[in-house]
Image: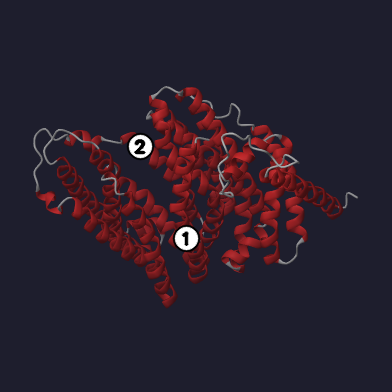
Amino acid sequence: MNRSIASGILSVVGGKVVILVVTALTTPLLYRLLGASRFGEYSFLLSVFALYMIFVSSGITDGVRKFLAEDRPIANWSELVVGFYFRLAILTSVVGAALLVVAARGRIVELAFGPGFATYFHVLAVLVLAAQFRSYARKTLMGFGLERYSEPLQILDTVAFVALAIPLVALGHGVIGALAGRVLASALVAVVGLALVHRQVSLRCIFSRPPSRFPSRTMLTFNSMSVVLVLLLTSLYHVDIIMLQRFRESAQVGHYRAALTLAEFLWFVPLALQTVYVHSTSELWSQNRHRQISELASRTTRYTFLLTAVMAVGLAALADVAVPIYFGPDATPAIEPLLLLLPGALGFALARPILAVAQGKGTLRYPVVATGLAAVINVALNALLIPRYGMHGAAVATSVGYGSMFVFHCLSARLVGFRPLVGARIGQATLATGLSSIPIFAMATNITKPWLALVVVPPAGFVIFVFCALLTGALGLGELREVLAAFPGPVEAPASPHRQPTNDRLGFTVGDWFQTLLLVVGMVLLVSGAIVALFRTGAV
């Protein structure tokens, strides 16, 4: 993988680590404080809000980032762009909030979702205003190239939510307290962000009238295909929760949301890859370097498969241990939906980088069609299975919908102009996953102490998986050496120009010793795990 792209990926991952850790700690705490039923209501409200905000913010946040980055021959261009989108943000947010209030007071919400939800929608109306200007401020800063401010604002939003929402919920304010925490955190980020924007461009520009040459129509219609793509992707995340709330009690929604939270941990690295690849592959597309793009996509698909598969196997093996420890003993019903969601989560993880490479070309017709087909399958199966099977039906439907993303985007990639499966070694990676799952599940089953299993199984399972990947050819020794070379090593003195560098008498480097040790340990763990599994099942 290109080192510059790899460093970009590491930068994105590093920036998201704080948010991931805080979210990982907060979600089970909210689940325990709210209980399964109210946590289900809270999750449902956030899903409705996420879909609703696509229409409220449609084209505004991405538009201001794009057009601020341009340098058009129009006087005071930056001020005009900031003012235009600020006025549009005010208009759409006020209209969006007003519609929620009307729906809540006109009993539309009560008839659609049941009594008690009208109060929640009044709070969501306030959140529309706060979230609109939070996102507007962040994307405006990004348009100015001030990511050093925009990214910390996202961390501030997460940390402020935890600091405000958790005490409110703990004091007995329930779902209203959690939503109020989101409102206050978003408002704080919006105020800080707009103050930073004001340092670049005076916000009095909202009163400036643009000249006749100002491309208002172009800016209004910008990003229509991107908005459709975002809507389709967001529907894959949230439509199952919304439909489950419609047909089942809130407790099932809470258990299902808990299962989704764990399954979505598999997407952390693929999401980082997607964030970087949209920009990193644009240059390759502009240079018509199709072969390099296909090689990059296939290698990324293989690495994503290997990394996500070992996480999925470990999570499946430890599900009956991890879920009660993470969410509490009341969350035990979430175990089965989690197991049903994992195959689809793996497929969705594989589709993410492929979609990013296609986005880098700028032609969104085929990715939109591929995502649309997956979204239709997801909605149809959820509508068919949820009324009869509840959260288990939702898990099966969503898993199939997620998995179809990989299939459809592989077909879309061929139409766009690259082949992500050529050289991806999917067969070898699948075989490595199957072989390693035997000893990993055996270890998880035979270690009876839950905390000991959580400590021992993940690292040991990773070593076993890497060994199986090397054994089947899914991963090469040279590739493993590249990964090891990325870590800092001892500083070597510069070699004399008159003297050839010498190796130690065995000709082994530290990386060679590490690989040999890895193979030996992996072989021992694989054989011992297989023997334990055979005795456990009574085969011998």
How many numbered badges does the structure rendering display? 2
Q: CA distance from mark 2 to mark 1?
A: 27 Å
Q: Earlier in the sequence, mark 2 or mark 1?
A: 1
Residue found 72% across the figure and 67% down from its top: 449
Residue found 15% across the figure and 53% down from its top: 203
- Front-most of 202 and 94? 202
Q: Mark 1 falls on what kind of element?
A: helix
Indicate left or right for 361 with 468 as reference: left
Q: Would residue 106 be seen by someone viewing this image from the given angle?
A: no
Q: Is residue 26 above or below residue 314?
A: below
Marks 2 and 1: CB-CB under 8 Å? no
Q: Is residue 478 above or below residue 294?
A: below
- Quarter of the image for residue 424 reads top right
Q: Mark 2 falls on what kind of element?
A: helix
- The percent coordinates of residue 489 (x first, y second) are 58, 49
- The percent coordinates of residue 16 (x first, y second) are 45, 53
Q: Would residue 416 be seen by someone viewing this image from the given angle?
A: yes
- The percent coordinates of residue 147 (x first, y second) are 33, 49
- Front-most of 407 and 378? 407
- The percent coordinates of residue 377 (x first, y second) are 51, 38
Q: Amino acid at mark 2?
A: Ser
- Quarter of the image for residue 180 reads bottom left
Indicate left or right for 201 with 354 as reference: left
Residue at the disc numbered 1: 23
10 Å crowding of disc 2: few (<14), some (14-19), many (20+):
some
Q: Foreground mark, 2 or 1?
A: 1
Residue at the disc numbered 2: 226
Q: Amino acid at mark 1?
A: Thr
Q: Is residue 317 above or below residue 216?
A: below
